[in-house]
Amino acid sequence: MLASSTTPDPYFFIVIFTGVALLFPLLPLALAWMWRRFFQPPKPGARKNATYECGVESVGEAHVQFRSQYYLYCIIFLLFDVEAIFLIPFAVAFTGLPVGAFIAILVFLLLLVEGLIWAWSKGCLQWAS
Amino acid sequence: MSEAMDQGLKSELQKQGIFVTSTQELYNWGRRNSIWPLQFGLACCAIEMIATAASRYDLARFGGEVFRPSPRQADLMIVAGTVTKKMAPQIVRLYNQMPDPKYVISMGACAISGGPFKQGYNVLKGIDRYIPVDVYIPGCPPRPEALLHAFMELQRKIDDQKLSGSDKAAFLKKDQPSEFPVPAFGEHDLQPPANPDLFHPPQIERK
């Protein structure tokens, strides 16, 4: 009975914690507000209130649209980029290759060339539609 | 406030453990030890400014190492280098976007007067034509020690600024402007070539 009256409730620390957590940001903000209110006159202006903080005036719209065609270009570029990685060791070892390996790489190339022709005929390489 | 308190009484109070006697003192102490400069350099002076901020000269000793990339968070503009006429409108605009109180250090011969390029067609003959400058540093370029000296001069200036009374600091007065007109390109030069409210060069009298 005596112990429970002297030791504080264990949840009391959460109350203290919440109080400090609220005071810590709110007190400086309140002090800054009071300072502005009683000492410093506000001096707003067109440039000071401008959204964009830069020496240069912003030009045009922020909502710029990119053509979705760009996405197709990227994927095709990525495919042929990977193809180039395969082609370099093939070109380096070209003279010492057996016939089977040579035919295998030709099949690989043929597949990609087919893909290129297909993309071309679908109009994927056309930038402006 | 305590501008009337003399130095002897102040040191006597400090011996007794009383260090802060007025709001103004506390406010200015805080301000002068946390001057955040705007992070931008224009020419070779900027290299000296970078050296000042780096470990050897260590601007952090004066509380000025926090170079801000945004004018909204900056207290001090160090105009470090040649201000071309192409760059001058941008600098004035950046100065306008800084919140009060704001200060300007004009670093080096070019920022003061155009320096070696004064006779050229494309260099502004001193940034004080468009924005008020607090401290000028001569030199081409000034050494980091000179920039530190300018920084200390600025701290002294901030320390002397009054919060109240008729001679209070300009940024506390309602009628003092915080923004200055941005010059634009005219046919031959920036228009206007100088802000007439701000730029009062000493008249040379030849006899």
Image (cartoon, grey):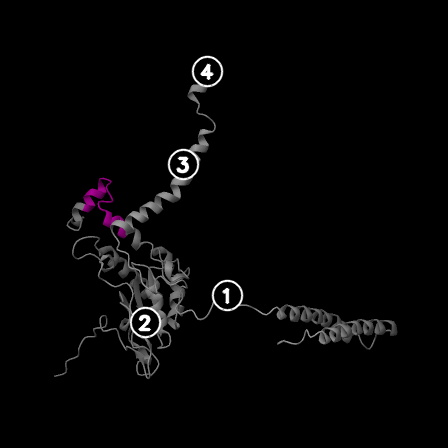
* First reached walking from the N terminus: tag 3 or tag 1: 3
Which residue does the numbered mark 4 point to in the structure image? A1
Q: Amino acid at mark 2?
A: Val
Q: Position of residue A97 (x, y in %)?
A: 84, 74
- Can you identify the residue that label 3 sits on? A19
Q: CA distance from mark 4 to mark 3?
A: 29 Å
Badge 2 element: loop
Q: CA distance from mark 4 to mark 1?
A: 69 Å
* Chain that bears disc 4: A
Q: Residue at x 65, y 71 (%)?
A: A73
Label 1 amino acid?
A: His
Which region shows up in magenta? B10-28
Q: Residues within 10 Å of mark 2 (few under 14, many from 20)?
A: many
Q: Nearer the viewer, mark 4 or mark 1?
A: 1
Residue on which the image places disc 2: B182
Quadrant in the rendering for residue B63: bottom left
**Labels 3 and 2 positioned on one and the same chain:** no
- Mark 1 = which residue? A63
Q: Earlier in the sequence, mark 4 or mark 1?
A: 4
- Where residue A125 sits: x, y (%)? 67, 75
Q: Where is the C terminus of chain B found, in terms of image quarters? A: bottom left
Tell me if residue A62 is in the magenta stretch: no
Q: Position of residue B200 (x, y in %)?
A: 20, 73
Looking at this view, is B2 or B137 the one in front? B2
| Residue A79 vertical placement versus B56 (above, below) | below
Q: What amino acid does circle 3 point to?
A: Gly
